[in-house]
Amino acid sequence: MTDWRSSPFDPVEDDDKLKEECGVFGVVGVSSAANFTALGLHALQHRGQEAGGIVVHDPEQGFNTVRRFGYVRDNFTQQDVMDMLPGPIGIGHVRYSTSGSKGATAIRDVQPFFGEFAMGGAAIAHNGNITNADSLRRELIERGSIFQSSSDSECIIHLMARSLQRNIPERMKDALRRVEGAFSVVAMTRTKLIGVRDPLGVRPLVLGKVGDGWVLSSETCALDIIGAEFIREVEPGEMVVISEKDGIVSHRPFEAKKPRFCIFEHVYFSRPDSILGGQSVYSTRENIGRELAKEAPVDADLVCPVPDSGTPAAIGYSLESGIPYAMGIIRNQYMGRTFIEPSESIRNMGVRLKLNVNRALVRGKRIILVDDSVVRGTTSHKIKEMILEAGAAEVHFRIASPPTAWPCFYGVDTPQREKLLAATMSTEEMREHLGVDSLKFISLDGLYRAVGEAKGRDPASPQYCDACFSGDYPVEPSDQIHKGFQLKAAE
Ligand code: SF4
């Protein structure tokens, strides 16, 4: 896929964006699971660009794995690599580290993780974050587990090793009942593909069908690339065990809870061509723009997106307001890894390396700039300067998410709370800080309406996880609380 958001290899990495997460993919019952998995991971590359890995099983050659740093397209397209990965069943993972070592990641932290058990091997790939990983890890190490990585996800393998159950799916249930937080897990044995979502279903996981085979993926865009049919979402709290012999068997290993899917997947994380909750992500983003135009109208000449993630919301804002849409900022699509180790002077060019103002268009105009979020505010500030330098008469920021005032502990890399602009400033203070003519964020209720909740957010029992906006954490982040994190005081 095109690099429509910042990459860890990018020297002008956009610190005004939250970084998710990971992407997971698995397939069973096809002639070459590795080829399908590589394509699926390529479609999920926006969920993690740091590293990727594939594990397969072949009846003659057993389990094989390749784990590499960098993009899927650079690692899993070479014939010699793919020749090492034969077999009809496989899983894969793309990673942006949300736990474990950051920056200088070790290859030992790259998933999938593999464990050899008495009843055979199993591999797992995890998207999300385990909020009690520190205490689990301490306990497991005290009881003799030897960890190979610094990743929270490895706890699952060690908990499975300690279970007394007789088969891998049952051991996995035991393990995941001890785990708190957000997890969408894709796992495999020699013959079974397993998918599990945490009881709240915070992170996505979908089920698809390709020929006689079955697919699990973080998003539907990875089904499209291999020509698979979207069947349904794996439900919150559900485990599906899929084999060529038995087809799909659904289990409910956890106590039932009201789902709290991550609302930010709709705003930013998922690809616009994916389907979430039966709804096109692109249309939801357009709806967000429409809501924003209703809530925060302003007299102006042009609506321009901050590319590329602000584009559908800007189109929605333009359609609702009747103000023409235009590409006032152009993104250089070829930044990629060109400047992996830039000189200081190139680094100082910052956002200009990536975005350029369409001067002829903006000169003398009152511009509405639509972006998906403001995290630290640094990039918004630079963009505003570029637009004014190019001769714009006014700059009005409209943001397609509420102020991000709280960190995410469920698999998204967020700066510490004090680094989030909205944690320390009111909207008016942020407007002054950014130096723009006006600044408005969509309200939480407006965002809920845009994702299809006509009555907005139910404050007594919210329909989504929105903790990074509201401070209402659906799963207590116990490791963070031990480290001194202060939850929001009850109102
Ligand atoms: S805290 Fe925000 S980013 Fe994290 S899961 Fe909840 S809504 Fe998503």
Image (tube, helix red, strand yellow):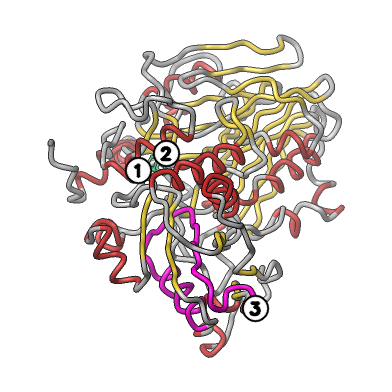
- Residue 204 higher or lower than 367, as above or below: above
Residue 443's disc number: 1
The one nearer the camera, 37 or 261, is 261
Answer whether residue 76 is visible to the viewer in this image: yes
Distance CA(mark 3)–CA(mark 1): 33 Å
Judging by the rendered image, the residue that carries numbered circle 2 is 447
Q: Contact, CB < 8 Å: mark 2 with mark 1?
A: yes
Answer whether residue 100 is visible to the viewer in this image: no
**Which quadrant of the picture is home to ligand 1?**
top left
Residue 475's disc number: none
Q: Quick one: SS at disc 3?
A: helix
Residue 269's spot in the image, x, y percent? 53, 46
What's the residue at 80%, 36% (across, down)? 226
Point out the tag, 3 or 1, that comes first from the N-terminus. 3
Q: Amino acid at mark 1?
A: Ser
Judging by the rendered image, the residue that carries numbered circle 3 is 360
